[in-house]
Structures are given as C-alpha cells and as structure tokens.
Image (cartoon, rainbow, N blue to C red):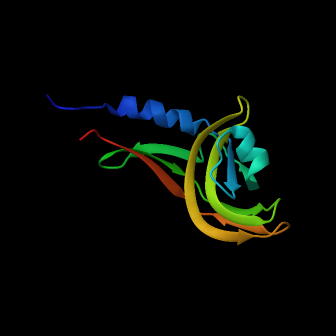
Amino acid sequence: MAKTASDAEMDAALTYIQACDLMVVCSAEPSSYADATTGVDLADVALSTPADLVIADNGTGRKITIAAKSAIPIDHTGTATHIALCKVSDTTLRAVTTCSSQALTQGGTVDVPSFVLSIANFT
C-alpha cells in the first residue's frame, strides 16, 4: 500500500505557521512563547500575514518561505542561534529553526535572510 499526503493536508500544517505575526531572534532554542519573547529574545520584528509567509510546492512536498527582514533593532546583547515564529494574539510559539551563530549587541540592528521550512511527501 502506498503512503500519500495531499497538498491540502501539508498546507494545513503550513497554514498554522503562516498565521505567525512575530519573528524573534533568540540566543537559545525557546521552549514556549514566553521563553521566545522574554527569556532568550535578542531582537524581534512584526510579520505581515500572509505576505511575509508564502506557501508553495517544493517538488518533494510543500514549503513555506519566510521573507527576509532587514535592520531589526537589537534589544539585548547575546549570540543569535535560533529564529522563532510566534502568533501574538494567542501567545503561541509555532515554529523554531536554527540560524548562523552571530554575536549581537544591544542598540545595533540585525538582518534575517529569507528562509524556508518544508514538509516532505511521505516515502
């Protein structure tokens, strides 16, 4: 018996992420919304939903591309290691990924390049 997942099925999971309206640069992997926004946060920026989070086919499943953000004000000094995507209205942490380790200094700015989160077809 073959294993299948429809695009609609994968898109439902990605739509949950697409509702995020806050990107947080973090000094460690956050375990919750509170941790991401007040525990390990270094910088944050609002996201325009869905313009900044675009769902599409990636050839082997589905993907969501998160738009690049430039000159994000740095609120706390530390080393960036993770990016968290959150939804403010229901205080949920919806996705976390690693980023290139970078030392950040309060009062400066940081750029986050565009990145992709993918869901592969079943194999």
Residue 50: x %, y % from top left: 59, 40
Residue 113 falls left or right of residue 71: left
* Whether residue 35 is situated above or below residue 8 in the rendered picture: below
Quarter of the image where the N terminus is located: top left
* Whether residue 56 is situated above or below residue 102 in the rendered picture: above
Quarter of the image where the C terminus is located: top left
Res 16 → quadrant:
top right
Query: Of residues 49 and 120, which is closer to you in this image?
Result: 120
* Residue situated furthest right in the rendering: 107
* Whether residue 29 is situated above or below residue 89 in the rendered picture: below
Residue 29 falls left or right of residue 90: left
Query: Of residues 2 and 59, which is closer to you in this image?
Result: 2
Residue 24 falls left or right of residue 12: right
Q: Residue at x 55, y 52 (%)?
A: 97
Q: Residue at x 58, y 54 (%)?
A: 67
Q: Residue at x 68, y 56 (%)?
A: 25
* Residue situated furthest left in the rendering: 1
Residue 4: x %, y % from top left: 25, 32
Query: Of residues 114 and 41, which is closer to you in this image?
Result: 41
